[in-house]
Image (spheres, helix red, strand yellow):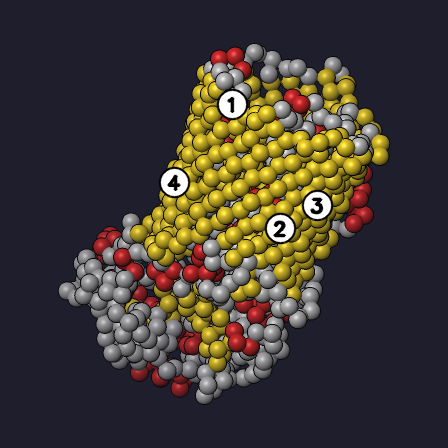
Amino acid sequence: MTKFKVALLFTASCLSVPAWAQGELPAQDDQSASAPEEEAILVTGSRIKRDPNDSALPLQIISTQDLTREGINSPEQLMMFLTTSGSGPENLASNADVVTGAQRGTNGLSAANLRGQGSAATLVLLNGRRVAAHGLSGSAVDVNQIPFSAIERIEVLKDGASAIYGTDAVGGVINFITKTDFTGLALNGFTDVTEQGGGNIYRLGATAGYGDLSEDGFNIMGAVSYSWNKILRGSDRDFVNGNQPNRGLSVDTRGTPIATAFNIGANAFQNPAGTLLTGLTLTAPNGGNAAAGGINILDLPGGAGCDSMDGGMAYDEVLWGSPNNYYACAWDTGRAAVIQQPLETLTYYARGTVRIGGIHDLSLEVTGSDADSAKSFSNAQLSANTTNLNIAYPLNAMTADTYNAVFNSIRSAFSGNPAQVAALNARYGLPISYRWRCVACGPREYQTNTKTFRAALGLEGPLFAGWDYRTGASYAKSESSSLLGSGYYYRGTLANGSYDPLAPQVAGAPAGYRGLVGVMNSGLINPFSLNQTAAGLAALESVSAAGTTLYGGRYEVRQFDASVAGSLFPIWGGDVQLAAGVDYRRETYEFNGSAAAAATAPVIFLAAFDNVNALTPKRRNVKAAYAELLVPILPMLEVTGAIRVDDYSGFGTTTNPKVSFKFKPWDMLMFRGSYNTSFRVPTFNQIFNGVTESPYSGSDLADPVSCPGGVPTSAYGSGLPCAQIRPNIWTGGTPTLAPETAKQFSLGGVFQPFSDFSLSVDWWSIAVDDTIQSLTLRQLIDNAALFPDRFIRDPGTNEIVTIDQRWINAGSRRTEGLEFSARGRVPAFGGAFTGGFDGTWLLKKREKLTPTAAYGPSLVGVFTFSGDLGNEWKHNAYLTWANDDLSVSLSQIFRSGYKNYAISAAGAARPDYNANVDDYIIYNASLAFTGIKGYKFTIGVKNLFNTDPPFAITYDGNTGAGSSWEPRVADPRGRSFTVAAEVKF
């Protein structure tokens, strides 16, 4: 999107929709020199009470009305809506397929990511205090644990705040603030039903309270909510299509529902004489050896065609640089993945407050959640090998018809070469090895349960004239466990290929045939057919591993805090105010593996056990003291300084200051700015995880020393300088990691010529050093000279055998942007038009990988497989007309496009390849009726014009994840209809 379009959209919104600034309460920028005492409250990012309408902080306040207008039903949807949020893999759709590295163990996790700094660099609070990080990941808070039905407002601080809160507050702070003095009974329900089917969302909730705090001296209240998101698969939406070769997209897998035959060799225990194609050369028309690349009978001359099976496509050997794969088929794995995970969540919230002596409030707050999610992705691919998975289709009375049909199809295709046919005939009767996508196995699934609990005791009130205190203690935990669902089976063999006596016996097979290998080598399952016999399905069921524990974890936070605040003395511009306090926090994290992954246990095929990362409880103590001083130098000029000292066990002491100012030369104009430092300590996993070694299975890597750029131009194993390489990949923790450190600047202004209009612009800059990263393979390949120790080579051949992708403190990141906000109100037609606009313009995003390296190219608007996409421009705009009984709203959500990924140079040369992904623009509409006292009804349409996500190449040849759209940006559900009802008694 051009800067001209951005400016035009912004100007049009401001001219046509006068508005008061979001993030700021309706009169937020109606700045007065001093706030009335009753308007002063604690706002996020400060310990000094102040009027949020007169704050120097770039604070966005989101009301429940804002959520209802946009049909936002969960914290995850809110994170996707915020323009200041990065476009990272923090939502459930982004983690629904096969993942590696930092995204492992994020089952069921939805996180916040302000300003694209990452989920671990955004601090999430509930009523101003920390909550526990997700039990599996141990790095980020699962925002879906927040009791959404009890929320009164959400404050989003778009600034660093380590001087107040300590670690993690680099990108900003999101503070969910609940109702605290509710009386009566409220019932509410919400539905969000898609037009195309699948992915429906529902929520039921109730809130009850008794006692008026000011009159009765007490209040007790509680809220409960139950929500459930229905499953949506890629096959439910037409835009999910990995078979678009003209656009440069095709899938790199030869594991298909109709098996692809391969030339796998012998194993002493399985198929000891070898297999049908072992050692053969069968020359394809392009000169490649089809026996080595795989032969699918659907793709042979006269075959039914790869597209005759659901999700099938001809393998694109030119796109992937693999000439031997001429006769192979591929299968669209993206259509098998879930693009909205099924999620059922129960949240509860209870609070009791008693007023002591008429001035001191003692409160006890209890909240928790219980969530079940199911991550489901492509069916298991069985790739025959010469060791532990030496599978092949035998010739016997049960299999003869299929065996002969496959054999004759292959022989016919190469009948023009008598020598090759003779060699094939000589091997007739040997079993046919293959690569197969086990549709009969069902999709692979992880079922994750996460329970959270938090209890907080607080006491606050006045100390003496002009001073008050606030103290509290809290305990929070998040506990998660993942089980294997469908699609997982005991392999049945030991490492050498012999049957494992501990694996289950195959039902219906001869004695001694065990596990999945036994099922396949018995011939009970036919990999060359989409239909299986009852006996074959029973055989599979007999070796299923469904219900086995995958892993689990627990994160606990114990915290005590105390602070005082008040006025010191008056000076020229008013009273100098001081806040000071102390924090103590103890964090504990543990991660357990599974007994099913023990060395003596039978292997479960493809189960991503993380026993190497099992952690006995690891603990971290944090002691901190802070102070904040507000100095009104003149009636028009206010300066605030803050400083915090944290002592972290294992890391030592860190000191972080913050200075901010507010200058208001006229009532209608205010300037504001800040400077601060912040930090983020490594997570427990980043420090203590073990080393996981995984083979690389993609076709897009070459030795970066012998082949500049690391792009292969010849096939795997060819021995040529630019041959494909498939090294092992190490991932895991690094005990010597140090914290990230950051410096942040902001400068902005607020223009409010009258009470019903405001406009704000803020420039911000975040400079992060010693960044904690697990560098992508492409980053390592492109910068091999900077990281020679990350490429482990065979001392004899000098070939790369391993790439070390473990966590490191790697260089620096520089990010800058502009944030715009406008709000306005105009009376008309017996009511009033109100409107708003929020936009974020990303000006800079650059990284360097070592302190002495130069900064790399701009990452603004550039595709990456992991991390933040860096959309250059995002905005939300809305227009509402409302009177006392009725409101009608129309809103626009805009996310700019970015540079598309190219699988290879051949893909980028395809006629319909789009170098840039289109902008994503959708519209929402809603109508709310409040004409009956105590009742509110809202109906709406989300994605009014049923806009599909724009085409984007997101397929990753290494993991097999991704497809033709970007879940970090777009909602895959399409047009949906919302109904919300609330009744209060």
Under mark 3, the amino acid is Val
* In this picture, residue 675 sits left or right of residue 614: right
Residue 357 position, x and y percent, is 50, 18
- Give the spatial CA distance, label 1 vs label 3: 32 Å
Residue 308's place in the image compared with 476, above or below, is: below
Mark 1 and mark 2 lie on one chain; the one further toward the N terminus is: 1
User: Which residue corresponds to mark 1?
Assistant: 360
User: Which residue corresponds to mark 3?
Assistant: 659
Badge 2 crowding class, 10 Å Cα cut-off, few under 14, some 14 to 19, many 20 or more, is many
- What residue is at 80 percent from the left and 34 percent from the top? 634
Is there a contact, CB below 8 Å, between mark 4 and mark 1? no
Under mark 4, the amino acid is Lys
Mark 4 and mark 2 lie on one chain; the one further toward the N terminus is: 4
- Secondary element at image label 3: strand
Mark 4 and mark 1 lie on one chain; the one further toward the N terminus is: 1
Under mark 1, the amino acid is His
User: Which residue corresponds to mark 4?
Assistant: 451
- Give the spatial CA distance, label 4 vs label 1: 33 Å
Q: Taking the image as drawn, is residue 206 in sight?
A: no
Under mark 2, the amino acid is Asn
Residue 604 numbered mark, or none: none
User: Which residue corresponds to mark 2?
Assistant: 656
Is there a contact, CB below 8 Å, between mark 1 and mark 3? no
**Which numbered disc, 1 or 3, marks the residue closer to the eye?**
1
* In this picture, residue 341 sits left or right of residue 32: left
Q: Which one is nearer the viewer's eye here, 215 or 346?
A: 215
- Give the spatial CA distance, label 3 vs label 4: 39 Å
Residue 121 position, x and y percent, is 57, 50
Residue 563's place in the image compared with 593, above or below, is: above
- Give the spatial CA distance, label 2 vs label 3: 10 Å
